[in-house]
Image (cartoon, helix red, strand yellow):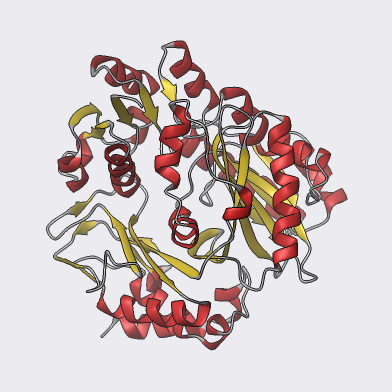
Amino acid sequence: MFRKVLVANRGEIALRIIRACHAVGAKAVAVYSEADAASPHLKLADETVCIGPGPAAKSYLNADALLEAAISRDCQAIHPGFGFLSENARFAARCEQMRLAFVGPRPSSMRAMGDKATARRTMAAAGVPVLPGSKETLSSVEEALALAETVGYPILLKATAGGGGRGMRRVNSRDELAPAFEDATREATGAFGDGGLYMEKFVIGGRHIEFQILGDHYGHIVHLGERECSVQRNHQKLLEEAPGNRIDPTLRAEMGARMVTALKAIGYRNAGTIELLMDADERLYFMEMNTRIQVEHPVTEMVTGVDLVAWQLRIAAGERLTLRQEELAPRGHAIEVRINAEDPAENFRPSPGTITRFEAPADTGSRHIRLDSHVETGYRIPPNYDSMVGKLIVWDEDRPAAVARLAGALTELRVEGVATTIPLHRAIVEHPAFVEGRYDTSFLQKYPEVLERARALASR
């Protein structure tokens, strides 16, 4: 195992990686920008290094600063977390050149699967259905306009180099495409340092299903079942659950086996997530692969008992994956909600500021309730980065019990001083369509009363 690991990220995921490092016997070196100098997660790191000013381009996206920090502190590995440089093949290659283990797939796999257009071809070759769309990264607005006429509106423009809804635009007509292309390119460039876009057909009323993958250096790859991430707003996930809602075990086994086969063909290793769209006829279509750990990985951990981040570190250190596919059937049901410092009543406007009260549910830390967060009372949320301040995860014996437990935990969670999405999550989990599992990616559009209920709860 590594002696020291540089944690090349911030906030909640940085804290998660620090804890995983300690679990496997490694020291964690945390980096921070000047805007994050007072972030509570730094107190749990073994060492800390300032890597630049607040803007991400000058700190968390600054590969030179990260590599210099790792070398100066005698680290053997870099864990990128999610976002920032986590899916940047060039950064992964530079780590290898400097004899630093990159905690993720090899650069060639990142190029093959991290680039969404290339990933579509790889999956199609393995027999996984793909949505109609571009076969390569779009070279221009003119190419996008021509292809959209063939694919048919509505379509989605999506960033090839990242996720989280950034660099993504739905386009309903020809007139909307050019400005959407420009906006998505600009946003993708700012978030990932790569403005490349691809196109796929937009399926109205689809469900977002994704499979968790782990593979080692020796060709052993397993899938850990699926998650459902269909409760979204503007293509950004709000709530995730595992296993997927009403997913047939035969379909799980069949699709999981096909995806494992595809990844073995390219020698994939470490963690990854294959994202699919399920249409109204319950057919699954490949959308993209994220070659990193996901925000929503805790729900998979809760139903499988597998520490995914610890396994990322073990695999990167050259250990063999000892998990067996037949042992990875989900047990019980888990649900996660993302707690964002945003105001749902104001079109999810970010709400940076000082948290005057932060109080976890009473049963946090038990088998049933987990809270992944780096914040505490008195913490000031900087305006420079993503608005997520934590994730509340619950587990129970079945979905109805998990929904009920989540509803109770949300009433106990207190985050005051800034607007948050807690009232929205309370409104979601009490809505009959969600309780009964009758929802898709258009949930908030179909049921506008959810936002009205959230506004009422927030005003109390």
- Please tell me whether residue 69 is drawn above or below residue 207 in the rendered image: above
Whether residue 85 is visible here, answered yes or no, is no
Whether residue 292 is visible here, answered yes or no, is yes
Give percent across and percent down for residue 59.
Answer: 31, 30
- Please tell me whether residue 338 is drawn above or below residue 293 in the rendered image: below
Q: Residue furthest right?
A: 150
Residue 21 located left or right of residue 396:
left
Residue 210 located left or right of residue 281:
left
Q: Quadrant of residue 310?
A: top left
> Residue at (47%, 29%) from the top-left corner?
319
Instruction: Please tell me how many numbered marks the rendered image carries.
Output: 0
Q: Quadrant of residue 269?
A: top right
Residue 119 located left or right of residue 458:
right
- Please tell me whether residue 359 is drawn above or below residue 165 in the rendered image: below
Give percent across and percent down for residue 376.
Answer: 17, 58
Q: 24 or 201, which is in the foreground?
A: 24
> Residue at (75%, 66%) from the top-left corner?
279
> Residue at (78%, 52%) from the top-left corner?
131
Q: 372 or 432, which is in the foreground?
A: 372
Q: Quadrant of the N terminus?
A: top left
- Please tell me whether residue 426 is drawn above or below residue 134 in the rendered image: below
Give percent across and percent down for residue 292.
Answer: 51, 39
Q: 207 or 256, which is in the foreground?
A: 256
Residue 381 located left or right of residue 146:
left
Q: Residue furthest bottom?
A: 432
Q: 186 or 300, which is in the foreground?
A: 300
Q: Quadrant of the C terminus?
A: bottom left
